[in-house]
Image (tube, grey):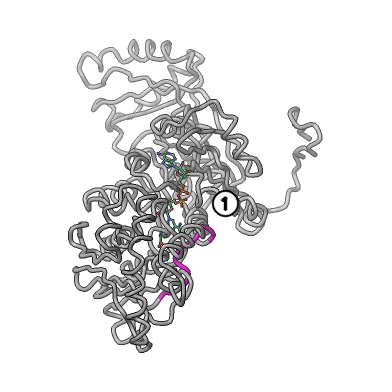
């Protein structure tokens, strides 16, 4: 029986002969946390029988313990690991023994690498089980852990890899999560933004964490939080019951560059950067984050809707570093729109046309701007309900809609820019020119007659106002329309979005997604779903 000195109440581990057979591909993971490797290279080794015999007899004779050996089939190099204290002595002995080969340039000088570690997976079930090494290297590669050398004996009971000692803790966790999937997988999330969406996400994660562990085997630790004022870090997870107080008590003033640097230096496995802001600043770090093998989840549309070059860079960087870039909430909040489009594209369909209502705010406004209601008050109500962008001018100017249609167009394979989207604004000039949110609301009040006329005109024709976007064979426009009951977009309510995809396969009857397209609960839920899909 082995007991835990750090946790004396824990029942301990019993070591016995008659253990139950296990279905798991590996039995355990072990590590050696400080080793060095010596690398010998040269043409003098190729096809030369007795070379390794000389090398390893020499080391054995001099009592240098070799921990791991690896040789490529080209026989051009041999790498072996020893205790750090033995490296210089081993080098000296080798250079003495192979002096003639060195002089004749048939062997290169010994190269030593320090600060390394070995991680090994062990178990009888590995034998004759394809995919075990694939799983190991996937877990390491996905977390940006570079493998310096590999060894597996033909008994197939053990695969050992040499990695940087700095990556050992991360590697142990990542490999553990990779193999023991019936146990908890831990995601380490670094979250920017504690506004409407950010705090709703924390509330949902808190309420759902026990279910997530029990039913999905997933544990989410919020390892970092920042808003514009402060930031806080905790590799064990900031308490979701008390995050406001922990953030408030933090001595770290907010600094985005520092936040990203700290996230990288904490070097945690299954790391995810979540951007719940409406700011262009975090977007400047996405590429660096991908390059650090960290996935990005964002409800912030600015990243994907700036230049096409930037959109492409983000997607390529995520792809080449084997991490996820999820942004379901960029269009339609929590509705499965991006996912649906990706599935269509990935399965070889072609999007010919998209027709959509994608502003939850404007949808809500037109669905409630009835009877005696005045436009200004309905806009305010949409903001109070959390449907608008932090600055509602972004919704009413059509900018938010433009971002969404541009993201959809790009995901559908069209390399379009902002200037390629024609926008008919719902606002008169004075409102568009307002310099602040206050001025904007004042301008809305002053333009009450303009909006009342629109309302009366639509009502007189038995029509409703709809702000509709269309992407047709690579051309996009957003227009204000009055539609009658024969139009498929007539019967919307609340903050509903609707999107209809006409594709090669859905040509006669388009594929339609409809439902609430704005609001903190549905948007945070979309971010939440993206989070638990990371690495899936
Ligand atoms: N409200 C909705 O229905 C939907 C919103 N979204 C998107 O969600 C995002 C967030 O919206 P809200 O939560 O309503 O905004 P908000 O204004 O309530 O919160 C934004 C948060 O970001 C923080 N922030 C801003 N710049 C920052 C920076 N440089 N570093 C760290 N933190 C920073 C602020 O301190 C604040 O905590 C927006 O990009 C919006 O487009 C997406 C889909 C639907
Ligand atoms: N402000 C947006 C929220 C979702 O992206 C909207 O109203 O649609």
Whether residue 518 is in magenta: the answer is yes
Neighbour class for label 1 at 10 Å: few (<14), some, many (≥20)?
some
Relative side of 130 to 183, left or right: left
Tell which of 323 and 301 is nearer to you.
Answer: 301
Image quadrant in which you'd find residue 456: bottom left
On the image, the x and y values in percent for residue 114 come to 42, 20
On the image, the x and y values in percent for residue 200 come to 55, 52
Q: Quadrant of the N terminus?
A: top right
Image quadrant in which you'd find residue 31: top right
Q: Which residues are magenta?
A: 513-521
Relative side of 94 to 479, left or right: right
On the image, the x and y values in percent for residue 424 come to 24, 67
Question: Which residue is at 37% across, 67% downward?
Answer: 358
34 up-or-down from 357: above or below: above
Question: Which residue is at 38% across, 65% downward?
Answer: 359
Image quadrant in which you'd find residue 405: bottom left
Farthest residue, direction bottom: 486
Q: Quadrant of ligand 2?
A: bottom left
Question: Which residue is at 20% across, 60% downward?
Answer: 416
Whether residue 83 is in magenta: the answer is no
288 up-or-down from 478: above or below: above
- Residue designated by label 1: 25
- Does residue 278 appear anywhere in the picture? yes
506 up-or-down from 449: above or below: below
């Amino acid at each position: 029986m082995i007991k835990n000195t750090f946790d004396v109440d824990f029942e301990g581990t019993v070591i016995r002969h008659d253990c139950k057979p296990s279905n798991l591909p590996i039995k355990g993971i072990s590590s050696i946390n400080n080793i060095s490797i010596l690398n010998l290279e040269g043409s003098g080794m190729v096809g030369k029988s007795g070379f390794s015999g000389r090398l390893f007899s020499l080391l054995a004779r001099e009592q240098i313990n070799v921990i791991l050996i690896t040789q490529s089939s080209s026989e051009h190099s041999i790498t072996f690991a020893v205790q750090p204290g033995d490296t210089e002595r081993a080098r000296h002995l080798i250079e003495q023994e192979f002096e003639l080969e060195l002089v004749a340039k048939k062997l290169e000088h010994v190269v030593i690498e320090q600060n390394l570690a070995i991680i090994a997976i062990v178990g009888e079930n590995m034998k004759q089980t394809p995919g075990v090494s694939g799983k190991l290297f996937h877990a390491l590669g996905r977390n940006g852990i570079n493998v310096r050398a590999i060894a597996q004996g033909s008994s197939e009971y053990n695969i050992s890899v040499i990695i940087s000692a700095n990556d050992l803790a991360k590697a142990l966790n990542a490999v553990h999560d990779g193999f023991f999937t019936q146990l908890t997988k831990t995601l380490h999330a670094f979250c920017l933004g504690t506004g409407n969406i950010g705090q709703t996400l924390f509330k949902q994660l808190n309420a759902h964490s026990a279910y997530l562990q029990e039913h999905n085997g997933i544990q989410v630790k919020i390892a970092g939080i920042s808003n514009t004022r402060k930031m806080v870090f905790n590799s064990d997870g900031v308490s979701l019951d008390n995050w406001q107080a922990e953030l408030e008590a933090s001595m770290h003033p907010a600094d985005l560059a520092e936040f990203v640097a700290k996230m990288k230096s904490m070097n945690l496995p299954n790391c995810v950067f979540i951007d719940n802001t409406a700011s262009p600043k975090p977007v400047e770090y996405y590429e660096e984050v991908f390059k650090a093998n960290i996935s990005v989840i964002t409800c912030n549309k600015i990243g994907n809707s700036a230049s096409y070059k930037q959109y492409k860079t983000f997607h390529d960087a995520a792809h080449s570093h084997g991490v996820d870039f999820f942004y379901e909430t960029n269009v339609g909040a929590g509705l499965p729109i991006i996912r649906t489009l990706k599935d269509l594209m990935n399965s070889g369909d072609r999007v010919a046309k998209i027709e959509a209502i994608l502003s939850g705010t404007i949808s809500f406004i037109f669905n409630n701007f009835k009877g005696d209601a005045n436009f200004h008050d309905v806009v305010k109500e949409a903001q109070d309900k959390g449907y608008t962008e932090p600055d509602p001018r972004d919704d009413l100017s059509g900018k938010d809609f433009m971002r969404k249609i541009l993201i959809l167009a790009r995901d559908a394979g069209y390399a379009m820019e902002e200037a390629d989207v024609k926008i008919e604004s719902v606002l008169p000039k004075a409102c568009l020119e307002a310099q602040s949110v206050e001025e904007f609301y004042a301008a809305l009040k002053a333009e009450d007659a303009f909006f009342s006329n629109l309302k009366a005109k639509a009502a007189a024709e038995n029509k409703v106002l709809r702000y509709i976007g269309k992407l047709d064979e690579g051309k996009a426009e957003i227009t204000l329309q009055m539609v009658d009951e024969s139009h498929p977009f007539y019967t919307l309510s609340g903050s509903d979005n609707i999107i209809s995809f006409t594709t090669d396969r859905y040509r006669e009857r388009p594929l339609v997604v409809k439902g609430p397209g704005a609001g903190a609960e549905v948007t945070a839920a979309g971010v939440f779903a993206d989070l638990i899909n990371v690495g899936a």
